[in-house]
Amino acid sequence: MSITDQNGPVLYFDGVCNLCNRTVQWIIKQDKKKIFRFAPLQSAGGVALVQLRGENNANSVLLVVDGRIYSKSSAALQVAKQLGGIYSLFYVFIIIPVFLRDAVYNFIARNRYKWFGQQASCMIPTPELRARFVD
């Protein structure tokens, strides 16, 4: 699997997490330029990316931009930056040390199923959104 993103940034997310799915749907609505593509971490590409990073599980959102892999809070802030407009103002939080940002991220990640629930399988994009999803 190549981590190149020739067609724009790719956001890998937990496809069975309700919070993650809602967040992806929100990003799709805000992404007027349609720069982002998406894939569940449970997809072949997502599994390969997690293994490439040497992780045992996929407990983090991963964003591939220009061949670079961002995870956790850094990925979320990069999404805000890439969306532009008012959302890019959130990128100012990059000045907070990563260990503090990721501590908040990890707390939410550990509790996301309990707070927001999960689905039995990954979401299936609508036919009009299918082109924005990769494997």
Image (cartoon, rainbow, N blue to C red):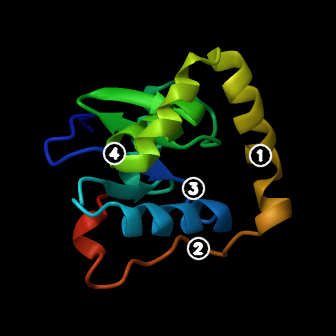
Q: What residue is shown with label 2?
A: 121
Q: Disc 1 residue type?
A: Ile
- From the image, state whether disc 2 or disc 3 is nearer to you: 3
* Cα distance in 3D space between marks 4 and 2: 31 Å
Q: Disc 3 residue type?
A: Asp
Asked whether disc 4 touches disc 1, contact meaning CB atoms under 8 Å apart, the reply is no
Q: What residue is shown with label 4?
A: 84
Q: Quadrant of residue 99?
A: top right
Asked whether disc 2 touches disc 1, contact meaning CB atoms under 8 Å apart, the reply is no
Q: Quadrant of residue 93?
A: top right
Q: Would residue 127 appear left or right of 94 to someone viewing this image?
A: left
Q: Disc 2 residue type?
A: Ser
Q: Would residue 12 appear left or right of 31 to someone viewing this image?
A: right
Which badge, 4 or 2, comes first in the chain's sequence? 4
* Cα distance in 3D space between marks 4 and 1: 25 Å
Which badge, 3 or 4, comes first in the chain's sequence? 3
Q: Which residue is drawn at 39% across and 77% down?
A: 125
Q: Residue at x 42, y 35 (%)?
A: 78
Q: Quadrant of the C terminus?
A: bottom left
Total numbered labels placed on residues in the image:
4
Disc 2 secondary structure class: loop
Q: What residue is shown with label 3?
A: 14
User: Eyeballing the image, is 11 above or below 16?
Assistant: above
Q: What residue is shown with label 1?
A: 108
